[in-house]
Image (cartoon, coloured by chain):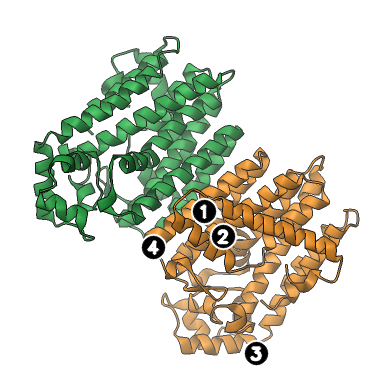
Chain colours: A orange, B green
Amino acid sequence: MGSCCLSTNVSFHTAIQEEIHAVEERIRSQVDGYHPDIGAALDLLLSSGGKRLRPTVTLLIGHMLDAPQERLITLASAIELLHTATLVHDDLIDGSLLRRGNPTLNSQWSPGATVLTGDFLFSCAAKLAADTESVPAIKLFAQTLTTIVNGEITQLFSSRSRINREGYFKRIYAKTASLLETSAKSAALISPEVDDETVEDMRKYGYEIGMAFQIVDDILDFTSDEKVLGKPVGSDLRQGIITLPTLIYSETSMNDLDLHALLESNCLINEEQVSRLVIAIRESGAIDLAFEQADQFVQRGLASLRKLPESLERQSLEELAEFIVQRKM
Amino acid sequence: MGSCCLSTNVSFHTAIQEEIHAVEERIRSQVDGYHPDIGAALDLLLSSGGKRLRPTVTLLIGHMLDAPQERLITLASAIELLHTATLVHDDLIDGSLLRRGNPTLNSQWSPGATVLTGDFLFSCAAKLAADTESVPAIKLFAQTLTTIVNGEITQLFSSRSRINREGYFKRIYAKTASLLETSAKSAALISPEVDDETVEDMRKYGYEIGMAFQIVDDILDFTSDEKVLGKPVGSDLRQGIITLPTLIYSETSMNDLDLHALLESNCLINEEQVSRLVIAIRESGAIDLAFEQADQFVQRGLASLRKLPESLERQSLEELAEFIVQRKM
């Protein structure tokens, strides 16, 4: 979590931070007794930071709904480790050398070792999910991995020229919102005496903030800078990935030759084209319109919390949703 | 299952064959509604055959112990699909172009698409495991994937010169026996009113025949021919993998220069060295001694069935165990 939450109850946030720490410890303990290089890889992955957004959502919702703490930490660990495992294979496939400013596993290891490390972490995430002993949560967890991977395969095989908003929203659902949805919904599923309506409200909260989070991530790839981002600006365009700012820009600027080259050729565009296109998209109204879209998701996410009684957890979930559109990294 | 079982009750074996068919259908149905190329990949993987040894073990044990049929087919599907998924990443990492005489996925697809297809199939296997609704079976399933992948990572990072029988047995446990152990044990776990001793006997049966199966697989890489094997003879030696025949041969023939080159260099040996070494190992007593070792595992597997009442299923499990040392492919 960012500084968004420090304005409220300090001891409460210290407690959540301690649980996030317990989640990290639980994840690390999964590799005890296995090949030492896996432990080294996991340390590298965990120490490179990340916002721990998913376990934070799980913990806040679970506490709000009186989930047993131990199971909640197990569930949050399963979710964060699943997220970490997907990044290992993603970076390998994309050939990414940096994530959050740190070298990726595939930049240092052979492809075979990287594939297997990802597989190993998937298996540990599955064990943690099983340790929740909640069959509905385990099923949701497995289904989410199917959704995430299907999204990646669809992206790999899809044509750039055909992408539209519907395709973009499907893609970011698979990539990000599905796991945030699961982070939220599964916390409700392991909580005692939660009615179906609350489970659905929590699912919706996770979905909406997940969609907003990915839109903002895609915006930051245009508006941030390399130091803050931990990777070069414009990397989506460089990889031929069309995100919301580019889509919005394309709706009014199809005569931009760089954009035309990006959408119509099967090749990647060059560095000069990437730079020109980043500037053109920044200077168009596309960024503001994309933020508006993200904010609409956030507002729907906030609305889904309204039926719940007020609590420190609910307040933090609201702040978390608002932080998503305010964040700079 | 091979022709080993056709000598007993024909209608019984027809019933098992029909269930194996139901397992294949269940596996295929997992990809419905997802990217069509995944379905095509799965069809390729399933149509390339395989003995369906693991689901056969699950079905026979489950029926013997009165497991509910629907859950049993779900479990057997989860196990066979997990096995299939591991082969996708294995073949990619080994750079294998053929499996059972058919082109591998990685020989036709990009590494990225192959990694993701493997991940997708893992996720579907996890969903099927969750569909058994047996938390102990789900836990065992996840643990088995951890064991399999840890074995592969250990093999990737280990030095050839250090391999001994203990290391070899650990490796084939991870590679093969662990999933056969799980195929057997999990069938007992989803059966009603099965005592701990029977669960343990079933686990042991799966473990022992799994160890024997892999030893025979490793022997056939020396004694079979390319047509039957579906891949070139001596492929383990070619990849620098030391299996039991080579280990036994090394105990008496350390002055063999080809063997010395294989064990002491960090490079792979050439085709001429592979051919000479295959002949030398074939002509030594190593093959017979390796078969004796496999047979000891089979005998212990048979012993673990003895406490169970006689039944068609038990008889088939015995025949299956014996088939393992008699098989030619």
How far is the residue under mark 1 from the one under mark 4? 15 Å
Residue at the spot of label 3? A283
Q: Amino acid at mark 2?
A: Thr
Quarter of the view holding residue A233: bottom right
SS of the residue under disc 4: helix
Q: Of the residues under marks 2 and 4, which one precedes in the sequence?
A: 2
**Are the residues flagged by discs 2 and 3 in contact, CB closer than 8 Å?**
no
Rendered position, B237 above or below A249: above
**Are the residues flagged by discs 2 and 1 in contact, CB closer than 8 Å?**
yes
Residue at the spot of label 4? A111
Residue at the spot of label 2? A84
Residue drawn where x is 43% and y is 67% of the image: A106
How far is the residue under mark 2 from the one under mark 1? 8 Å
Question: Residue B19 appears at what percent x and percent y?
Answer: 44, 26
SS of the residue under disc 2: helix
Q: What chain is tagged by disc 4? A: A
How far is the residue under mark 2 from the one under mark 4? 17 Å
Q: Amino acid at mark 3?
A: Glu
Q: Amino acid at mark 1?
A: Leu
Q: Of the residues under marks 1 and 3, which one precedes in the sequence?
A: 1
Residue extending furthest right?
A310
How far is the residue under mark 1 from the one under mark 3? 42 Å
Q: What chain is tagged by disc 1? A: A
Q: Of the residues under marks 3 and 4, which one precedes in the sequence?
A: 4
How far is the residue under mark 3 from the one under mark 4? 39 Å
Q: Of the residues under marks 1 and 4, which one precedes in the sequence?
A: 4
Q: Residue A182 got which mark?
A: none
* Structural crowding at the residue carrying mark 3, measured as other residues with C-alpha within 10 Å and reported as few (<14), some (14–19) or many (≥20): few
Q: Is residue A104 visible?
A: yes
Residue extending furthest top?
B310
Q: What chain is tagged by disc 3? A: A
